[in-house]
């Protein structure tokens, strides 16, 4: 599928029109719910391109970190600096595929159509976007009757419809069959190659190996390590990541 | 005074003969209550939507008032509208008292709070589900309201039905502002009250039967639309 057909311009070209939001610098980020500290003094930097895999045990704070970076939540303390922009200022230039996608009570095509129209995009791209994620034949079906994997693909198509410069993916392949996992990875890989910055949460080790440029490993709301993929997979630096890779409980 | 059985037989005869007077009363009832429901929806739905997604000071107070107004007694609404429309009232110059328009106004006031309060609940529940996704998509307030109204359309149909049901069945407000004038402002409920007090049970029963059938029919229609929608997971 050519980029022109699905209407996705190279992200770099779009970025040139407005002030860059990458690289990202996060400093001493803290998120508390009442007494509980769920993210604790998180600091890291992300460069302008590639795919960062966010990993860590259940409840380690991956989904919350994504929502903070995307500007959907306010941190209790700390800074998120998208090259001079705050997180809430750049929400519109990013897209997030939620762990549990919420689809509108409409047809599959109408879900995409709604976003294209709401965001002032060309409504003619709808069919191409659905074909791109392999849902072309389901266009007229009610979105809420899609299988778990199909719903994830529709959520991905909807995210791509907004032409994001940064794409957050929260376990987008958790309920997919192996062929669909590879299909999603290839779609995400396309986006990355067009210059979309990918931030991808996964528990799937094989997927992390296939996709990662770097790995951000969280444990109990802290960063256990942030390492280049080439260094992480042979031998993680942190005990937490080593235990996780070996299947030991580290919660 | 007829006995019950005779009255019932006569009533059925009236219904099936398509009696012109009867038809006139039924049509006026429908016209008044459907118009009131439409106007109440045009006012009540936006209010319900704004309160559902808005976070403003005094919101809880608005909620309490909205819910309290749902229980407005029809005679009190009738009285208030009467006071405004009577010749010495502030709107007396309009000459609306004892017209169908006055009845529409009274019923609209009666059911707008019902439409607003019930739709607020429906839309707030839906918004709780959609809010995070909508924030990620950076939608405007207007786009959010439009999307919520559209996606809740089948539930809102039931809300409209609740308003219509209350309007078409009430007698207290329309009798005060309409006056139950033959061929002008006589509707089903006021006719039933009058004919019963006159002892003409057949006509009263005939109207009662029609009122029940309308209520059942409208409910059945809405229910079947909702079930069709539910099959597609659109509810
Ligand atoms: N609204 C909230 N109030 C209180 N605690 C919360 C809230 N939301 C999340 N948490 C807690 O924060 C922690 C991190 O949640 P988060 O969803 O980020 O985990 P996660 O790393 O994405 O886990 P998973 O792999 O299961 O998706 C969890 O322990 C969760 O219970
Ligand atoms: Mg999660």
Image (tube, rainbow, N blue to C red):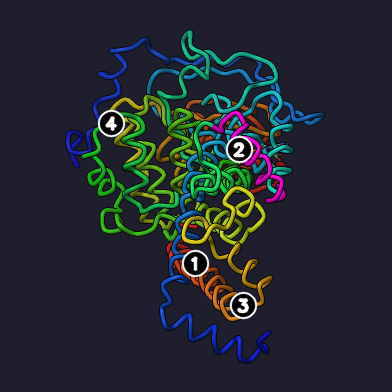
Upstream in sequence: badge 1 or badge 3: 3
- The nearer-to-camera label among 1 and 3 is 3
Q: Position of residue A214 (x, y in %)?
A: 47, 28
Query: Residue A121 has which mark?
Result: 4
Say if disc 3 is inside 8 Å of ligand 1: no
Rendered view: B29 above or below A11: below
Query: Residue A187 has which mark?
Result: none
Residue B169 occupies quadrant: bottom right
Mark pair 3, 2: CA separation = 31 Å
Q: Could you confirm whether marks 4 and 2 are on the same chain? A: no
Mark 1 and mark 2 residues within 8 Å of each other at the beta carbon: no
Say which chain tag 1 marks: B
Rendered view: B229 above or below B100: below
Q: Is residue A5 left or right of residue A16?
A: left
Q: What element carries label 3?
A: loop
Q: What element carries label 4?
A: loop
- The nearer-to-camera label among 4 and 3 is 3
Q: Residue at x 57, y 58 (%)?
A: B180
User: Which quadrant: the N terminus of chain A?
Assistant: top left
Say which chain tag 3 marks: B
Q: Where is residue A57 in the image (x, y as percent from the top left)?
A: 64, 41
Please name the residue that numbered disc 2 is placed on.
B86
Q: Quadrant of ligand 1?
A: top right
Q: Could you confirm whether marks 1 and 4 are on the same chain? A: no
Q: What stretch is highlighted in magenta?
A: B71-92
Mark pair 1, 2: CA separation = 34 Å
Q: Could you confirm whether marks 1 and 2 are on the same chain? A: yes
Mark pair 4, 2: CA separation = 56 Å
Q: What element carries label 1?
A: helix
Say if disc 1 is inside 8 Å of ligand 1: no
Density class for disc 2 (Cα within 10 Å; few <14, some 14-19, many ≥20) is: some
Q: Which of A111 and B151 is in front in this view?
A: B151
């Amino acid at each position: 599928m050519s980029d022109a057909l699905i209407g996705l311009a190279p992200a770099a070209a779009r970025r040139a029109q407005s002030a860059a939001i990458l690289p990202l610098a996060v400093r001493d980020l803290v998120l508390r719910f009442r007494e509980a500290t769920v993210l604790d003094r998180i600091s890291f930097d992300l460069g302008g391109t590639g795919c960062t895999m966010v990993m860590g045990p259940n409840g380690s704070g991956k989904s919350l970190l994504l929502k903070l970076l995307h500007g959907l939540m306010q941190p209790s303390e700390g800074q998120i600096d998208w090259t001079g922009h705050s997180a809430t200022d750049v929400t519109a230039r990013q897209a997030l595929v939620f762990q549990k996608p919420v689809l509108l009570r409409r047809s599959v095509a109408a879900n995409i159509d709604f976003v294209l129209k709401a965001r002032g995009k060309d409504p003619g791209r709808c069919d191409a976007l659905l074909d791109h994620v392999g849902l072309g034949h389901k266009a007229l079906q009610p979105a809420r009757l899609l299988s778990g994997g199909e719903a994830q693909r529709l959520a991905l198509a909807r995210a791509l419809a907004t032409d994001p410069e940064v794409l957050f993916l929260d376990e987008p392949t958790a309920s997919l069959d192996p062929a669909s996992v590879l299909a999603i990875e290839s779609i995400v890989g396309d986006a990355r190659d067009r210059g979309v910055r990918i931030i991808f949460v996964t528990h799937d080790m094989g997927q992390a190996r296939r996709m990662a440029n770097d790995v951000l490993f969280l444990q109990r709301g802290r960063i256990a390590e942030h390492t280049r993929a080439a260094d992480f997979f042979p031998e993680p630096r942190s005990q937490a990541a080593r235990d996780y890779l070996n299947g030991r409980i580290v919660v | 005074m007829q006995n019950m059985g005779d009255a019932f037989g006569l009533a059925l005869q009236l219904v099936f003969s398509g009696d012109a007077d009867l038809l006139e009363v039924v049509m006026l009832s429908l016209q008044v209550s459907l118009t009131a429901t439409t106007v109440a929806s045009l006012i009540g739905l936006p209010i319900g939507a704004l309160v559902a997604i808005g976070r403003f000071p005094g919101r809880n107070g608005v909620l309490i008032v909205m819910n309290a107004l749902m229980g407005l007694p029809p005679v009190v609404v009738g009285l208030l509208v009467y006071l405004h429309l009577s010749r010495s009232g502030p709107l007396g110059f309009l000459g609306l008292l004892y017209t169908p328009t006055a009845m529409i106004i009274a019923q609209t006031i009666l059911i707008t709070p019902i439409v607003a309060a019930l739709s607020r609940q429906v839309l707030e529940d839906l918004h709780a589900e959609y809010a995070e996704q909508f924030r990620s998509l950076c939608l405007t307030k207007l786009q959010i309201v439009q999307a919520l109204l559209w996606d809740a359309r089948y539930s809102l149909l039931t809300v409209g039905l609740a308003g219509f049901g209350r309007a078409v069945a009430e007698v207290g407000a329309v009798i005060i502002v309409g006056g139950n004038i033959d061929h002008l402002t006589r509707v089903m409920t006021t006719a039933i009250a009058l004919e019963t007090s006159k002892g003409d049970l057949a006509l009263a029963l005939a109207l009662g039967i029609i009122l029940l059938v309308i209520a059942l029919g409208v409910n059945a229609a809405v229910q079947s639309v909702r079930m069709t929608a539910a099959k597609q997971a659109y509810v």
